[in-house]
Image (cartoon, helix red, strand yellow):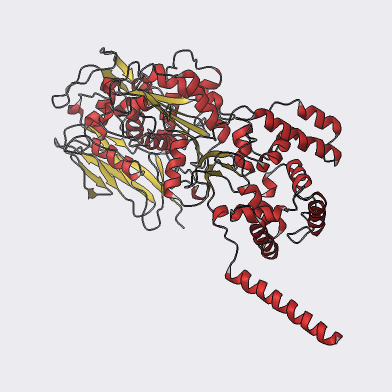
Amino acid sequence: MNLRRGARLALLTSTLVLAVLVADRLAPPDLSRVEATTRTVNDRDGALLRAFITPDGMWRYQTQPDDVDPLYLAMLKMWEDRRYDDHPGIDPLAMTRALGQWVQAGRIVSGASTLTMQTARLLEPRGRNLGTKLVEMARAFQLERRYGKDEILSVYLTLAPFGGNLEGVRAASLAYFSKEPGHLTPAEAALLVALPQSPEALRPDRAPEAAMAARNRVLDRAAEEGVITLAEAEAAKLALVPSRRADMPFLAPHLAERLAAEHEDPVITTTLDRDLQAAIERLLAQRRPVADPGASAAIMVIDNHTGAVLAHIGALDYFDERRNGMVDMTQAVRSPGSALKPFIYGLAFGRRLIHPAMLIDDRPRDFGGWRPSNFDDGFHGIVTMGDALATSLNVPAVAVLDRLGPQTFDSAWRDAGLALHYPGIDPRPGLPLALGGVGVTLETMVAGYVGLANGGLMQPLSVLPDTVSEPSGVRLMPDFAAWYVADILRNAPRAIGFTQQGRHGEIAFKTGTSYGYRDAWALGFTQDVTVGVWLGRPDGGSCSGCVGIEVAAPVMLAVFDLIADSGGPALPSPPADALLIRTAELPNYLQRFDREDTALGPQVAFPLDGSTLRLAWLGDSAETLPLRADGGLQPYLWLVNGVPVDADRRGEADWIPDGAGFVSVSVTDAAGNSASVDVLVELVGRD
């Protein structure tokens, strides 16, 4: 008989176990709610920049136990489920106690719901009755069988209700305390433990007295259980409960919006520095650099060594409709004013067409019927090229671009990966680009200035850590040319209120003001950091007071003040091939820009006689050697070791050496006059 009963019991048990296993397989827990969490965009250290509300309108952040203060977890288990770490989803002791109290009192005195059962209810909300309680118990067993204790606790921490559209302890901590839940005071931890019991009735922003009373009950129990001391509990009771909900973090909103549209990841980590981003946004909010009510601002800060974007401000005020605040002005195509001039000079320096000590006459000039004037409507006579760039004279810049060639500039810029946008129906480069007659974005401009900071070598910009890369290998200009530009800009006139001494003296920067005062620019760099600032109206209208040196430069210098370590002077050591000499010591062709002694015949401007040229070996050929001449009558005929080399309409030629050794270069003009030089070519990187 006993054997039969034992067999029947074993069969029944086996059947129940099988039924549970089949049910578990056929009806697994529905985790869709915990998977539909708030998407977040974080800084490089994981700090929250901006979050996006879930499709069902909730703030619901994925939260792990390690994300939460241990004091909160201790209080939570003490209050809700002291044997959570030991039971299988249902606490038999708690159920026995609850049933005994129910029988004795004739009503429910206390519950026996474990954190696992509450988690089951959060995953599948149902009405409160005996049937749903049994379902919750079954689901609790199921959860415990499938997942570890920390995984179950993570679901609770993510879904627990805290009033309104707040779900999860992280959302509540951000909303009520304006901070992450990793570091909570006893008062804060106790409030977060109390709220899920009755989240709407206990909301501190609507029922502060009820919230405080519930919090204090948790504190009293915590002191009784030894979770905190009595003194800590009494001190915590003196703290006020929050009277309002704070806004969720909203930093770098434009960049966060763009990344959220481009990537589906629930958590997007960027290269931004949250503290720097917040400091710059506060600076703009307090300073309001432009009085025009329709004006906006855009700022980017770049780590020159990695190309990582450290700060990204797309507008002055995201929510200001008058300023079109939702438009990301780092991506807007605008006129750069004079901010392209350093690249015009740099490319001309690199081709040995000009030198910083070369003299040029700042006088009225006619360029095919166009007679540009300077910003001050005056002319300054004989100046050096360095001074012409430092003081941003317009006529010399156009003259240099005319000699360099707008198409040469455009090709070099595009080869470096930098985009230019020409207005009108004839999108070809012309001389007006020297004064801003072309469209660029702030992102493009800062990329160019990062190239200057890196000695002419381009460094791709990145907003995502996994896309940060080494320098591209693309060279915008030779390192000596970039050094010339940086040295000139580091000694350029400072903005009002700033001097060339101290920290600001280390910054090389250039400003720009577009036609009609529509755009004000300031772009500066040190060895380590580049800062770009744009101010103007997003609608393209004239902006009152938008002059680069007056409004954009002070903002740029103030941003540098916010950077903990912005690096030393830009390119402090000149490259070996930089000619650091005075005008009188320059080769004749580099002494004056305007030479009229054509009867004397041509001179070889580059390469210099007797020089040693170290050219890079590119795998199957050498780096191109530019051949430049000055004086005489064009067109020129170029010969290298007696072999003709094709020249363009300006008389310039490019020759690719086929090996190392001594080379004879000669040029003959249309009158038959000639000149020659001998140089030594060395190929770097060739075995």
Residue drawn at (39%, 45%) of the image: 680
Residue drawn at (66%, 42%) of the image: 196
Relative to 11, is 427 on the left or the right? Answer: left
380 or 180: nearer the eye?
A: 180
Q: Give x and y (percent) for residue 303.
A: 51, 37
Quadrant where the N terminus sits is bottom right
Residue drawn at (40%, 57%) of the image: 619
**Quarter where residue 628 is shown:** top left
Q: Give x and y (percent) for residue 339.
A: 35, 27
Q: Is residue 576 visible?
A: no
Q: Give x and y (percent) for residue 405.
A: 24, 35
340 or 599: nearer the eye?
A: 340
Q: Give x and y (percent) for residue 16.
A: 70, 75
Number of numbered discs present? Answer: 0
38 or 135: nearer the eye?
A: 135
Residue drawn at (67%, 56%) of the image: 152
Q: Is residue 167 visible?
A: yes
Relative to 218, is 578 on the left or the right? Answer: left
Relative to 81, is 30 on the left or the right? Answer: left
| Residue farthest toward the front in the current orientation of the protein | 106
**Quarter where residue 677 is shown:** top left
